[in-house]
Image (cartoon, coloured by chain):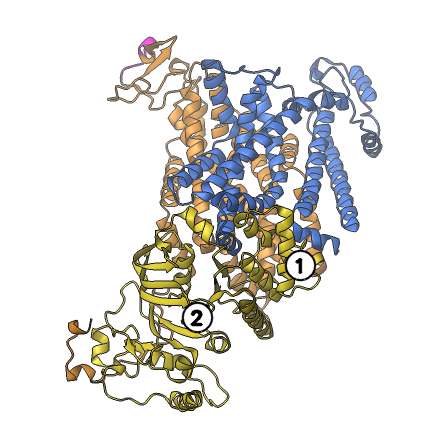
Chain colours: A blue, B orange, C yellow
Amino acid sequence: MRKYLLKRVFYMILTLFLVATITFFLMKLMPGTPYSNQQKMTAQQIQIMNEQYGLNKPMWLQYLIYLGGMLHGDFGVSFQFSNQPVSYLIASRIGASAQLGFQAMIFGVVLGIIIGAVAAVHRNTWVDTLCTILSIIGKSVPNFVLAVLLQFYIALKLGWFPIADWGGFSYTVLPTIALGVGPLAETARFIRTGMVDVLNSDYIELAKAKGLSRYGIVYHHALRNSLIPLVTLIGPYTVALMTGSMVIENIFSIPGIGEQFVKSILTNDYPTIMGVTMLFSAGLVAVILITDIIYGIIDPRIRLSGSGD
Amino acid sequence: MEEKIKLSPESFEALPKAEELDNEKIAAPSLTFVQDAWRRLKMNKGALISLFVIILMMVVAFGSTPFINHDSLVKSAPQYANLPAKIPGVPINGFNGKLKVSGEWVDEYKQNNVPSNKYFVLGTDYLGHSLAQRIIYGTKISLIVALVATFFDLTLGVAYGITSGWRGGRVDNIMQRIIEVISSIPSLVIVVLMLVVLKPGMTSIIAAIAISSWTTMARMIRAETLQLKSQEYVLAARTLGETPWKIAWKHLVPNLSSIIIIQTMYTIPTAIFFEAFLSFIGIGISSPQTSLGVLLNDGQKNFQFLPYQMWYPAIVLCILMIAFNLLGDGLRDAFDPKTRR
Amino acid sequence: MAERILDVKNLKIDFHTYAGAVKAIRDVSFHLDKGETLAIVGESGSGKSVTTKSLMGLLANNAEVTGGSIMFHDQDILKKSEKEMQNIRGKDIAMIFQDPMTSLDPTMRIGQQIAEPLIKHKHVDKKKAWSQALELMKLVGITDAEERIKNYPHQFSGGQRQRIVIAIALVCYPEILIADEPTTALDVTIQAQILELMKELQEKIETSIIFITHDLGVVAGMADRVAVMYAGQIVEYGTVDEIFFNPQHPYTWGLLNSMPTLSSTKLEAIPGTPPDLLDPPKGDPFVARNPYAMKIDAEQRPPFFKVSETHYAATWLLHPDAPKVTPPDEIVRRRQTFKDIMAHKAI
């Protein structure tokens, strides 16, 4: 088990190193310079700026400086946002994104499990059909379209929630829904399929033969067995939430990482792009590792084979 | 019981011997794999309707090429800007050229002195282009992006998967490590980096989507190839000295076809989504170019006052996504009878 | 005479499918006495599993009981609500399934799986239920039961798992134990052990067993009485000696003939396939595969003819007007043995 973990951590570090390297050199290939008002600047000014940002040093030295800085959390200085350090920019914005992502994940997964389980228990009835239709729509309607519609009809027309910005909990409701619908639909489909399989299995037949009630069977046997594989979806959900945050935070003007990322891309602010890229990659790699470990803990079959390794 | 029975001596005569009994009589006519899958797909109404919708949208989108071209769509006609939908003979508010302005339905066509014989079925955008034409053109672009990206995803993913699974051993090990590393980079990051480095536009979007999405296909193909490799008929072909190319083409690809088809059906909507997503946040295709994402981006700006400009492309995009997802589910069920309950 | 605990009368069950109603069980009657073992024998699709599922009230959703009654003591099981059935299942009537590899919940500890029926039916607390589960694990022959009670199913072998499934079935000391092909999925050597265990436990906890199988070889050592099913009907039933050594129905002949014995030089298969139950034949369902078929077989379903007090067979060959036929050699040999057995019993 320990050997396996060490191997995984090694690959994690290798992945992050590769991402850092690729990002760095891609950014160097980028057309145009990072200064937004370059036309107005004299050659001398540009030279001073280059010196200030270390852009006049040889490429390999810049690369080493960049890697070295990254080791103690220094991602350089943003070109666009009043010369703030990238790490500070990220730190000041990560709270909103993390809260939003976490809420959306809980909202989607919990509601998805309920809908999927209800559909499976009532399979091949109108309840099942309704749940299937809803999850197909949830999977198919892009979250940014949903976000615009929610913002206009629920916030602007009905006035139930704030239209945009970031304040108390009420500000988070609509973005959470918009962001969480994708995971919700996916979870509902996943749980429904898995649970229908489980409900057709021999051990459910045996549980029925024991005289257990329908609730007892679903709660004690079916649900647990269909929930375990759901852990494997947490990784893909994290990706979906990162992607979604870019557009949802923009629509609702939430000061988060995603909104920052889009701004940086549009303004060629490459220290920030690299910083956020590293953050997203590190987040995903960590989530994948953690879910693998969790999976090993909650599934007795894997638990055994893992310790025998 | 006994009374009802009418027995005569002839009743006990031996029954003439029936024709030779078939020990393995098969009740249903035999079908090939594809026929069988098609038969099951036909029973799935949602998938069948989706297939029809997709074909219809493709025919309209690609068939429009001689009539709707890029040049006519970039020429602006400010005198027709922001007109709502008008379909002659349909006196329903919203389709008769009237628009709700501060609670009142106002005939925008009259207000702007549009000639009475001029009308736009889905209205116009802020530069006076026919929204219907732009949606059809945008659908075409979205479909092209999706199909080309999927084609690369298919060829690269399938070839990589077969090679990795077939060669096995160290080659497989290395190839799998590479995939592992690539797939732990968020695809969004890859796409964004590609777009930042290349010039935003169709080519970069296609390249970005293709590069970031092939790993899933490669993984599935590899797993299946590993299984097929140990099947007797493949072993037989190897023992008979068939070349690896021939085995791959004759035995592997046909057996992998169902996975390939199903996976493609899921890659296409993902690609359509990504294109719309990137164009929507402004780093993909951008105005005056047209795609569904661009139309949504344009429409969103005026949503409060001209909701139709976003609704129509949004509806088309959603229908496209739903149709591909439903067809994908249908194909999965049709090819894999085990999942049907 | 032993107490009769189960009496199935004229049971009819249809399955509704896209192709139409499949008449899976067509007028089946049998009974079960206290402490005895009844074997129901037939090829796959003959309706033996459906019959037992109806005893448990566990028929699939598309199944419909169209007639008959299942009297358990003095109550009709078919008239019970789902709630009432839950109180009978696992407590009065329990079941062992075919495949021990898939019939245990992979994510629940063995102890809990055995204890579950006790908690449900006897309302004991978890601790007490586990200690009873432990006793039962010892009873079914699991070594190191104290250690293994906390294990998960994948940590047991197939034979051990079937022992656990038996323990689950017996934990409430049911009156009737239904065993649906309990040894089919096991190795031959393990099969014998499991059968031995079942016989042993039957004596200890005084249960009646309905034993479903397609394997006549297993029946010989297990059963007191045998019912032979074909195409949703019982075609012959009697004591195990009567069925094995004095069979009357041509289908039973075919079954016995296709069973390997020490003296047989060649195995005889029964030609053809069972009839389509979407549209069952109006006469004897075996007519198409019966080398001794008569015209009447195609026209009318034969009633049960009495062979002895305990032995009945539904074949027109037993009608007084029917011509005498000579059964296959193997059956003739067996009938010779039967005479010896009867003679032995008479002394």
Residue C133, percent from left and from top: 62, 55
- The residue that appears at 84% across and 28% down in the rendered structure is A57
Q: Could you tell which of marks 1 and 2 lies nearer the N-terminus?
A: 2
Is B112 in front, or is C302? C302
SS of the residue at dot 2?
strand
Residue C279, percent from left and from top: 27, 64
Tell me: C152 left or right of C340: right
Q: Residue furthest front?
A: C1
- On whether residue B225 falls in the magenta region, the answer is no
Task: Say which residue label 2 marks.
Answer: C38
| Mark number displayed over residue A75 | none
Main SS of the magenta part reads loop
Task: Say which residue label 1 marks.
Answer: C155
Q: Amino acid at mark 1?
A: Gln
Q: Specify start and end residues of the magenta stretch as a single range.
A: B110-116
Q: Amino acid at mark 2?
A: Leu
- The residue that appears at 76% across and 37% down in the rendered structure is A21
